[in-house]
């Protein structure tokens, strides 16, 4: 096996045994990127020289602890000191931050080596990475199909073995959905588990940083590093971070698993439903208790999300006004025109749509009917989960209603595209941890199974995911990178 | 015409709270730094940043609320106030909308002997915006420069009920509020540095009408005088408009100090929908009763209590008490001086008189002055025991003010010791009498001027240092015995 | 819930976008479609429900009042489209 095909824990072993060096690993990674990225198009920015320099330093020091010497990719909305951070937008095409996000800093402190910034839907708004201002990312399993979004580049890069792991963000499904489409493991932890400092904000009460990896063990060991309280983020939880790798024992005897009937409705592809039901049978075989439940407010999560997220986003993106950074239209003769022209030219259509939607939902006369109403429905959705979690340990469901759709597929109605997130959004609304792992294929395209846990109980999710993974082996399957 | 109308005034006062760092980041709040040298990604509104609340800001907000007799609710939170302007980096201001830190307080004012209670609707915390520098006037400049040093400085916005009925009441309210803020130690209230800003809401209605008239907001009031003039101008403008049947627009106007008039500021297009919603990046605040009590325990003596003390304990007139308690520095100076020199009225006279004159002349605040309270006390004692005359004291005082030296040192250096020694004066007196027999005769013949002549001569001979009262006595005795 | 072009104009102004006539039409349609979809929330009775404004049951997150060095001016201005005399430069306000 090539170095670029290995997982983080496998690379750790090789380095510990001095069977390879960080420089060799990084070179292997860049060889792979050079070979496939013009087809997959995961990366917006590559930092080869910087990466090789860091690798050399790690090798010289000769100490391989944790993720020292191991390459990684970052979704392009993590602010990286001295490295362009575009958020997939023309608005920030040349923005170079002088500060670093906490999550990426923690990886850097452990000598992890960033190799580049990954493609995404503009400002995290989208479910296909087609909303990137630069180019779309292609699904490694079928290059004519989307990689999902908004963390499309992050998922595709891992699936294509361009990086062993990556960080993404998830506000309505943006880690889990692309992970599902690309057949990799994606974890969105509990809201507050990982610091949002230095992560360009989309929807402040929904955004969470998470990990995309080739297997569950990798995901757990990276989460160990990035999770934990950060005084720079007032919404960062003070909860202790357990060692998530210690629960990876394959034992799910007595685990109480609920599956909500609303997530197995007509809107979900039959093959996907079958695949997840088969997974539930597998769990039963392994000794878990599997029962059907109801989360009656499920169908209202998406409409409520499409009021809350745009509302918060409309305020978060207002700072892009051409004054201090970002795109400015210099032809404007006065400030009012400068604002309007710069924002008009710097933002794509989806971003404008959501900003206007959010502005409307907060505007005088509409606040109660829209924004406040959505917050109340949010409470009801969260209550549904609380009730179920009194009697169950985890919830299992499909991650997405379909497998990856074709690039360039026109949707007349924006809502049709939004429906991609219908199974993932409720989890963000309740602030709970959610994970997607591969559990099957439909005509060669990966199917993802979603695991949802209690607040701050990522450990049980990792445990359950690991048991399934080790008993099935979907994580060992790799795309051939041809077109179907 | 004005007899038929009543002016209704409410004031919105913004005060910078006296903390070392800004409200949501650890940048310094020091005034006067070079542009953009006290900024960081947080206060400059860069992508990906998050606010973290400075605890001291909440302490000072609670303290202010207590000083203004406000309720401090158990829960409060921050909201985003959304609007675009080059000095507002996030294009929203983190402020407090429906759950402010203080509610329902009051402030009592005294105008021409009439006491009146002005209600305080609320006080809330918010962050300041940056500064725009224009070439000339904002309406004619071709470009503007943005300095973000001030961005994020903590402000407390104090909103009064529309209880004021005259420009004078408004002025007295602002003066009283300023004194309270100074005494509570929450702000240094320097209007010229912008740490105290006032906007006025003015409307006019026919006397007897319950409904309020159209309200206009006036900004850019940079002094107490501007406040009074602007209110008077605006009230007159409203009354004239009503009389002429013209419409008064609800708008914001700016006070033009040069032209002494208000001008309209807002263009019609500008939508002022702030779209307030709860700030998701900041958890809400729970203010326990213990916290409030702990702050109450640190409350120093307020102007009203101090005035009462000065009147009742030291017998000062109310007027003196009011002047001496305008600032905590003034009160502290008085208290210290009076402690060493118990004649409160004399201390007061010197403070309101000479001290005040010299401070104004030199454009100084008491805190900046070299004059020490105990030195003034020592000087007053020196007058009492005759070491210096009242006349010489003025010169000594001026020197103390200029140099900060003690009266003893100054008296010695300038050789100003008053001669009160009979042994020194008598020979002198006898000498002068001997040398002027003709004047003695004039005196004997009832010419009063003669006496004055002798005083003058003695003063001349002693370079003004002779104790006048003693000279008077000795001279009279001597002349009487001839 | 249909949004008129006039309403779109108003919202676009609040959000500081310059939309041409075609764009106003298209955005009006798109926004109306989404708003129709979110209207399904109206069926749910929520009078007695407390809004879920904050996800975590946390209060009083504070920082000490201690000065820390900020960002040097060159870095704060490094991404500025236009700067002069150590400040951001913008065209006239009025």
Image (cartoon, coloured by chain):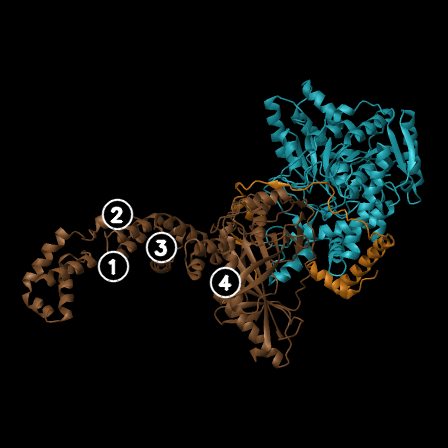
Chain colours: A cyan, B brown, C orange
Measure how far apart labels 1 and 2 are at the Cα level: 16 Å
- Specify the subunit that label 2 lies on: B
- Specify the subunit that label 1 lies on: B
Image coords of residue B203 (percent x, y): 61, 70
**Residue B384 seen in the current view:** yes
Labels 3 and 1 within one chain: yes
Q: For the residue labelled by badge 3, is the local secondary structure a helix, a strand or a loop?
A: helix
Marks 1/2 in contact by CB < 8 Å: the verdict is no
Disc 2 target residue:
B408
Disc 3 target residue:
B347
Label 2 CA crowd tier, 10 Å (few <14, some 14–19, many 20+): some
Q: For the residue labelled by badge 1, is the local secondary structure a helix, a strand or a loop?
A: helix
Mark before the other along the chain sequence, 2 or 3: 3
Disc 1 target residue:
B391
In front: mark 4 or mark 2?
Answer: 2
Image coords of residue B225 (percent x, y): 48, 66
Labels 3 and 4 within one chain: yes
Measure how far apart labels 4 and 2 are at the Cα level: 43 Å
Mark before the other along the chain sequence, 4 or 2: 4
Label 1 CA crowd tier, 10 Å (few <14, some 14–19, many 20+): few
Q: For the residue labelled by badge 2, is the local secondary structure a helix, a strand or a loop?
A: helix
Looking at the image, residue B63 lies above or below residue A336? above
């Amino acid at each position: 096996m090539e170095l670029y095909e290995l997982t983080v824990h496998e690379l750790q072993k090789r380095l510990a045994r001095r069977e390879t060096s960080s420089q060799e690993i990084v070179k292997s990674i860049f060889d792979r990127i050079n070979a496939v990225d013009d087809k997959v198009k995961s990366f917006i920015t590559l930092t080869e020289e910087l990466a090789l320099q860091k690798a050399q330093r790690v090798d010289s020091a000769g100490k391989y602890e944790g993720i020292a010497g191991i390459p990684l990719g970052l979704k392009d909305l993590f602010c990286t000191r001295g490295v362009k951070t575009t958020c997939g937008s023309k608005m920030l095409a040349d923005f170079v931050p002088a500060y670093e996000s906490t999550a990426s800093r923690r990886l850097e402190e452990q000598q992890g080596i960033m190799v580049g910034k990954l493609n995404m839907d503009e400002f995290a708004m989208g479910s296909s990475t087609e909303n990137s201002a630069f180019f779309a990312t292609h699904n490694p399993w079928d290059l004519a199909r989307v990689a999902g979004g908004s963390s499309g580049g992050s998922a595709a890069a891992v699936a294509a073995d361009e990086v062993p792991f990556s960080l993404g963000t998830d506000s309505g499904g943006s880690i889990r959905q692309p992970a599902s489409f690309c057949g990799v493991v994606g974890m969105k932890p509990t809201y507050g588990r990982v610091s949002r400092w230095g992560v360009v904000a989309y929807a402040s009460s929904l955004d969470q940083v998470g990990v995309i990896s080739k297997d569950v063990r990798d995901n757990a060991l990276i989460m160990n590093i990035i999770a934990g309280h950060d005084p720079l983020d007032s919404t960062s939880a003070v909860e202790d971070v357990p060692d998530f790798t210690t629960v990876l024992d394959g034992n799910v005897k007595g685990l109480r698993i609920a599956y909500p009937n609303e997530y197995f409705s007509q809107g979900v592809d039959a093959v996907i439903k079958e695949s997840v039901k088969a997974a539930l049978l597998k769990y039963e075989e392994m000794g878990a208790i599997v029962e059907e439940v109801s989360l009656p407010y499920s169908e209202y999560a998406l409409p409520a999300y499409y009021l809350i997220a745009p509302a918060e986003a409309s305020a978060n993106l207002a700072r892009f006004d051409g004054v201090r950074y970002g795109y400015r239209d210099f032809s404007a003769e006065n400030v009012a025109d400068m604002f309007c022209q710069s924002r008009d030219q710097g933002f794509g259509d989806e971003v404008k749509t959501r900003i206007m939607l959010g502005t409307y939902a907060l505007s005088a006369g509409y606040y109660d009917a829209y924004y406040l109403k959505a917050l109340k429905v949010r409470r009801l959705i969260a209550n549904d989960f609380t009730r179920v979690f009194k009697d169950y340990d985890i919830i299992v469901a499909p991650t997405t209603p379909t497998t990856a759709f074709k690039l360039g597929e026109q949707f007349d109605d924006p809502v049709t595209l939004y429906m991609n997130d219908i199974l993932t959004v409720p989890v963000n609304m309740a602030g709970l941890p959610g994970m997607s792992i591969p559990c099957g294929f439909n005509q060669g395209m990966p199917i993802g199974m979603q695991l949802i846990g209690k607040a701050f109980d990522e450990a049980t999710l990792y445990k359950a995911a690991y048991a399934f993974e080790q008993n099935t082996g979907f994580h060992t399957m790799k795309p051939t990178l041809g077109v179907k | 015409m004005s007899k038929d109308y009543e002016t209704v005034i409410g004031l919105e006062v913004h005060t910078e709270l006296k903390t070392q760092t800004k409200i949501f980041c650890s940048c310094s709040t020091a005034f006067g730094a070079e542009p953009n040298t006290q900024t960081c990604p947080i206060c400059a509104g860069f992508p990906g940043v998050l606010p973290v609340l400075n605890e001291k800001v909440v302490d000072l907000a609670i303290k202010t609320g207590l000083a203004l007799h406000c309720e401090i609710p158990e829960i409060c939170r921050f909201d985003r106030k959304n609007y675009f302007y080059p000095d507002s980096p996030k294009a929203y201001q983190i402020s407090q909308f429906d759950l402010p830190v203080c509610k329902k307080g009051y402030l009592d004012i005294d105008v021409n002997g009439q006491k009146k209670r002005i209600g305080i609707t609320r006080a809330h915390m918010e962050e300041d915006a940056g500064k725009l520098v224009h070439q000339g006037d904002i309406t004619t400049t071709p470009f503007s420069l943005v300095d973000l040093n001030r961005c994020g400085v903590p402000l407390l916005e104090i909103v009064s009920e529309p209880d004021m009925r005259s420009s004078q009441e408004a002025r007295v309210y602002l003066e009283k509020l300023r004194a309270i803020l100074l005494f509570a130690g929450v702000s240094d209230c320097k209007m010229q540095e912008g740490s105290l800003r006032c906007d006025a809401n003015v409307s006019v209605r026919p006397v007897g009408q319950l409904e309020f008239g159209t309200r206009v907001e006036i900004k850019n009031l940079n002094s107490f005088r501007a406040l009074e003039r602007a209110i008077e101008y605006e009230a007159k403008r409203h009354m004239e408009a009503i009389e002429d049947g013209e419409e008064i627009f609800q708008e914001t106007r700016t006070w033009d100090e040069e032209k002494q008039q208000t001008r309209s500021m807002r263009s019609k297009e500008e939508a002022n929908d702030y779209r307030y919603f709860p700030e998701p990046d900041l958890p809400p605040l729970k203010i326990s009763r213990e916290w409030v009590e702990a702050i109450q325990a640190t409350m120093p003596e307020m102007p009203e209590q101090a005035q009462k003390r000065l009147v009742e304990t030291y017998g000062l007139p109310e007027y003196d008490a009011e002047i001496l308690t305008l600032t905590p520095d003034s009160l502290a100076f008085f208290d210290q001086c009076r402690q060493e020199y118990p004649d409160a009225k004399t201390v007061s006279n010197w403070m309101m008189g000479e001290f005040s004159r010299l401070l104004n002349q030199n454009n100084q605040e008491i805190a900046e002055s070299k004059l020490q309270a105990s030195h003034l006390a020592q000087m007053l004692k020196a007058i009492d025991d005759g070491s210096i005359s009242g006349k010489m004291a003025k010169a000594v005082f001026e020197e103390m003010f200029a140099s900060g030296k003690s009266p003893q040192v100054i008296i010695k250096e300038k050789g100003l010791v008053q001669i009160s020694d009979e042994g020194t004066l008598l020979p002198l007196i006898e000498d002068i009498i001997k040398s002027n027999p003709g004047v003695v005769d004039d005196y004997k013949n009832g010419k009063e001027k003669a006496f004055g002549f002798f005083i003058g001569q003695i003063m001349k001979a002693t370079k003004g240092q002779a104790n006048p009262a003693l000279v008077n006595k000795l001279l009279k005795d001597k002349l009487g015995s001839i | 819930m249909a949004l008129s072009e006039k309403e779109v104009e108003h919202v676009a102004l609040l959000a500081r976008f310059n939309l041409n006539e075609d764009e106003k039409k298209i955005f009006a349609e798109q926004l109306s479609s989404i708003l129709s979809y979110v209207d399904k929330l109206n069926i749910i009775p929520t009078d007695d429900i407390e809004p879920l404004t904050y996800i975590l049951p946390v209060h009083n997150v504070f920082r000490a009042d201690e000065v820390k060095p900020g960002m040097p001016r060159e870095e704060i201005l490094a991404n500025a489209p236009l700067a002069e005399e150590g400040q951001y430069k913008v065209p006239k306000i009025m």
